[in-house]
Amino acid sequence: MAASKIIYPENIAKFKCIGGSCEDNCCRAGSWNIDVDDDTYKKYEAVSGGFGQKLLENIREVEGKKSFKPQTDGRCPFQRPDTLCEIVIQLGEDYLCETCKIYPRQMINFNGNREFGLSLSCPVAVRLLLFDRNGITFAEKPNNSNSIEANETEAVAFRIRALLFGIISYKKFTLMDKIAYMGVFFKGLDKLPVDEALSLYHKNLYTQGILDEVHNARAKTDEFERRKVLLELALVVSNVIKTPEVLPVNTLNTKLYERLNNFKEALKTAEQAMPLSEAYDRVIVPYINKNAYLFENYLFYQIYFTQYPNGITEYGIGYKEFIGEFLMLLMFGAGLYRNKKSIRDWEMVNVIYLFHRTVSHNKAVRKHLTEVLNNIGSMGEFLSLFGKVK
Ligand code: SF4
């Protein structure tokens, strides 16, 4: 068994929460749930006096899960006007729930190693990890403290992941070619044993010919059908966004959450929604073509952070869902900024962190996404949804 390692993207070391200066402080509980784990809840039950009572009164339980009830302005009930945390001040950091203690950091054991990452629902993490033209590089050190079990499924996913990193990092492919090549590989993987597929695709990685099938099919795709599917994906996103029922924390949030509500409104009828696919072509596609590095970093990081494709049994379907979610992110961006001629980097930061805060954790997304994607036939048709992305 190989020695266990600690692995992390190098830029993580630079992460520092900017607290009160953050454009969308995560202590805003209105737009998502801040879960209270059972161990912490037990500690809260033992706190006496008025503060103990306040703790329990401000926790709600939905479908067996406890979380903090947001205040009418959307903030966590324990965030003070000066943005400091009342729980920390009254009881100390030990009394923070697990979510608050570690957020936005994530630690996961994978293939015998311990891997660290930052959630893309934090805007500072998005800027730090994704807006780096040098790409994402990893650091590692020996993990001396714990022995971590690995299993065969993880070992296979780890090897596939290495190939995917190679595809995403390959400079001569365009972003679309990288996405397409991943798809061609997964199509092969559903038919071939993993070892054979890996060696075949490693060997062919740098040949253009393998992408011809994809390019030909994309060229034939019907434009109307393309727009229809884009809108269906946008509808999936819109249906799972919980309309923030609360007033935003600051001016920037006001505008952003108004956009979120407008986006939902715009999708109520098909006619209203049609400009959305035009906004995707007008606003998002040129931005991607100018900043392909950012989306390469995004896909690269998502592969790492989600241990993709660990646990996936049908690789072809898993691939469509993985890339389908990426497409939903882009449609989400088109929805937020559909009245603009172009968008800037800080607006794309908003698109990414807000998508990860409001949409990507939602279980319903996966179910609806699969339904929409099941109706798309060939790889070429699927990839044509990206339009003129290069
Ligand atoms: S979202 Fe990130 S930077 Fe902002 S307050 Fe939360 S952890 Fe800090």
Image (spheres, grey):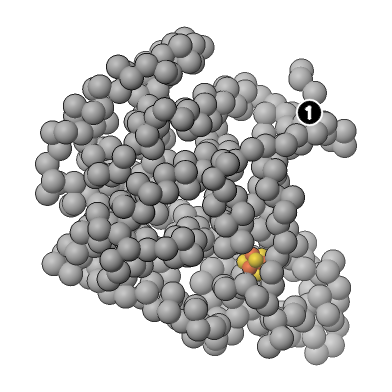
Q: Is residue 151 above or below residue 384?
A: above
Q: Looking at the picture, tell me which residue is in the foreground, 152 or 172.
A: 172
- The residue under the point 28% across, 37% down is 383
How far across and down, in percent of the image, does residue 80 sit?
Answer: 71, 85
- Quarter the C terminus occupies: top left
Give residue 10's position: percent from left, percent from top.
Answer: 70, 43
Q: Is residue 9 left or right of residue 265?
A: right
Which quadrant of the structure image shows residue 108? Answer: top right
Locate ligand 1 by image quadrant: bottom right
Q: Answer with left or right where residue 261 lies relative to residue 362.
A: left
Q: Quadrant of the N terminus?
A: top right
Under circle 1, the secondary element is loop
Q: Residue at x 45, y 11 (%)?
A: 203
Q: Residue at x 41, y 35 (%)?
A: 318
* Residue 334, image quadrant: bottom left
Is residue 11 in sight in this rendering?
Answer: yes
72 vs 180, nearest the viewer: 180
Dot 1 alpha-carbon crowd within 10 angstroms: few under 14, some 14 to 19, many 20 or more: many
Ligand 1 neighbours mark 1 (CB distance < 8 Å):
no
Q: Look at mark 1 in the image and give the residue it sits on.
A: 4
Q: Nearer the viewer, residue 374 or 294?
A: 294
Task: Work out whether 361 lies above or below 137.
Answer: below
Residue at (42, 49) in percent of width and height: 291
Would residue 59 be seen by someone viewing this image from the given angle? no
Please give the count of numbered marks on the rendered protein.
1
Instruction: Give the image location of residue 356, x and y in percent.
Output: 50, 58
State whether residue 317 is above or below residue 277: above
Name the residue type under label 1: Ser
Residue 245 coordinates in the image, percent (x, y) = 45, 81
Using residue 279 as the reference point, say whether residue 41 is left or right of it: right
